[in-house]
Image (cartoon, grey):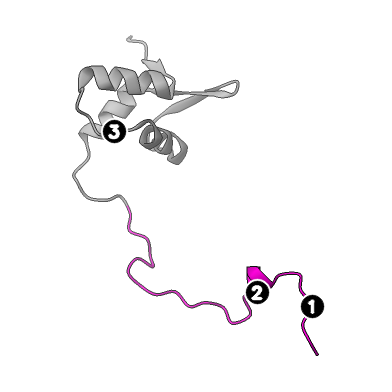
Amino acid sequence: MALPRMRLVDQAYEELKQLDPNTAISKNFIRKLTKSGKIRTVQVGRRTLLSFDSLLEYLETLDGEPDETPASYGEIRPVPENLPCPRHAGRKTRA
């Protein structure tokens, strides 16, 4: 049985850069993948270890399409009428 290659985000990023020096993948993107649960992780104390094999697997299965489109993408959202103005917050109104 092969042991999983568990890495910190920085270590995974450096190893990925060694495999592909011209990669556009950033440390922040890898962090987002770990927080979203798209790649396998293990919490060890305050640190999060990720499965480097799981990261490579995820990157290999990308089809170029975004995973999910926000429901309100391209639409104008209504602004609530009673929204307080932060510029005037805490001021007394004149009667």
What residue does disc 2 label?
84
What residue does disc 1 label?
92
2 lies above or below 32: above
- Nearer-N-terminus badge (2/1): 2
Q: In the image, which residues are magenta? A: 68-95
Residue 75: percent from the left, percent from the top? 36, 73
Locate residue 45 relative to residue 33 in the image: left or right: right
Residue 80: percent from the left, percent from the top? 57, 78
- Magenta stretch containing residue 78, yes or no? yes
Q: Amino acid at mark 1?
A: Lys
Q: Which residue occupies the foreground of this view, 63 or 27?
A: 27
User: Which residue occupies 37% across, 60% down?
Assistant: 70
69 lies above or below 8: below
Mark 2 element type: loop
- Magenta stretch containing residue 14, yes or no? no
Residue 34: percent from the left, percent from the top? 43, 34
User: Which residue occupies 19% across, 46% down?
Assistant: 64
- Nearer-N-terminus badge (3/2): 3
Q: Amino acid at mark 3?
A: Ile
What residue does disc 3 label?
25
- Separation of marks 3 and 2 at Cα, in angstroms: 40 Å
Mark 3 element type: loop
